[in-house]
Image (spheres, grey):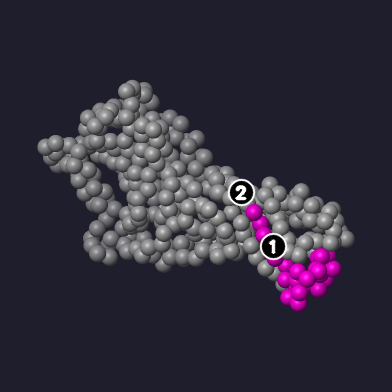
Amino acid sequence: MLRTLKRSSASLTNRLPAFLNDEKRAKVLVSSSRCIYRNLALEQWLYENATFSPGSPGILLMWWNGPAVVIGRHQNPWVECSLNAVAKFGVTLARRNSGGGTVYHDTISGTAAKIGHQKAYHHCTILVDVNTTILHQVLGGRCSNIESKATSSVRASVKNLKELCPHLTIETLSASLAARFNSQHQEHATKTRSDNCIHLINPSEDHFPGINAMCEKLHCWDWIFGCTPRFTIRGSFPTPTSCTGVLDLGDALGRNEVLKVELKCYHGQIEDVRLVPTLRRHGLLQAVMDEICGTRFVQSEIAEVFRRIKDSDPENSAFIEYLSRCLLTLVGNAQM
């Protein structure tokens, strides 16, 4: 992962590590952490705290992690990756602060950026040597039943650099990039100067005060899933004979006896449920809505809500159980 950061500001903060106070020299930071959340937190910490005078060469930040899928700030994780494959292969899922599309660390990708009034960072990723079979399974499929205005990724073919250069390592690649960055921004750069501009850093609370809180935020469900833009997911389900009496059939089902279910979700929580055909007992749907709205789009939590609904209305327990299976299937399909 490569990051270049620049910021124009008249004052320096006393929170900066000493080596960051030299604004005139190009600096390369290499993180010792292999945790995607901590490295994203480091990026954000530098964005908020590092200061640069106009014309400063800025910072090149490099890191590499364990296998991770990183979605853009305005993306939908249920659309961008297979959550089942993420769990199966032990891949970490993260949401970054910048926009753009989803990447599997580390891949050659399109670039993206976060641009503020006086500061910005610009980034891309480089694939050196990853298991492409897992990569394709994690990023391969999309749920076709989700409608969303979230930013969509552009799919592209990828290749490991190691396939082209078998002796390449991440360490040698990062050293070459650091030397190139230094020579680009430092007049009369030499190998010695290039080495001096490289700082191996430990993104810990001791060195970067406040970074632990940033890391915790990036790691939590409310950030990874709860920042998802509004989306709608739909599905059609055969209706068992035991449940057709609850539905207001009219001409809606015709001869198919299919229930169409539509869920609207915002910030990872269910905000509306629509059924076609609707129910004969309008109070039953309202009772379901009162309980289910505000529930996170998570199978275990939805199942728990329906257990409570069924216990409170034994007369309609068969239909409530059926509707529960419909919603749980929608969530399951979104995770495929």
Please check the rendered image and state whether residue 252 is part of the magenta-colored stretch, yes or no. yes
Residue 91's place in the image compared with 192, above or below, is below
Q: Mark 2: which amino acid?
A: Tyr
Q: Quadrant of residue 158?
A: bottom left
Residue 73's place in the image compared with 47, above or below, is below
Q: Find out whether the residues at labels 1 and 2 contact each other: C-beta distance under 8 Å.
A: no
Please check the rendered image and state whether residue 53 is part of the magenta-colored stretch, yes or no. no
Position in image of residue 281 (x %, y %): 85, 59
Q: Mark 1: which amino acid?
A: Val
Residue 318's place in the image compared with 230, above or below, is below
Alpha-carbon distance for marks 1 and 2? 17 Å
Task: Please report the bounds of the magenta region as a residue range.
Answer: 240-264
Figure label count: 2
Q: Quadrant of residue 208?
A: top left
Say if residue 255 shows up in the picture: yes
The circle on residue 85 is: none
Position in image of residue 6 (x %, y %): 31, 35
Q: Look at mark 2 in the image and give the residue it sits on.
A: 266
Position in image of residue 153 (x %, y %): 44, 57
Q: Secondary structure at mark 2?
A: strand
Q: Nearer the viewer, residue 65 or 298?
A: 298
Position in image of residue 107 (x %, y %): 35, 57
Q: Look at mark 1 in the image and give the residue it sits on.
A: 261
- Residue at image location 49% in from the left, 59% down from the top: 81
- Residue at image location 41% in from the left, 55% down from the top: 103
Q: Residues within 10 Å of mark 1 (few under 14, many from 20)?
A: many
Left or right: 23, with 130 as reference point: left
Q: Secondary structure at mark 1?
A: strand
| Name of the residue lying farthest toward the front | 251
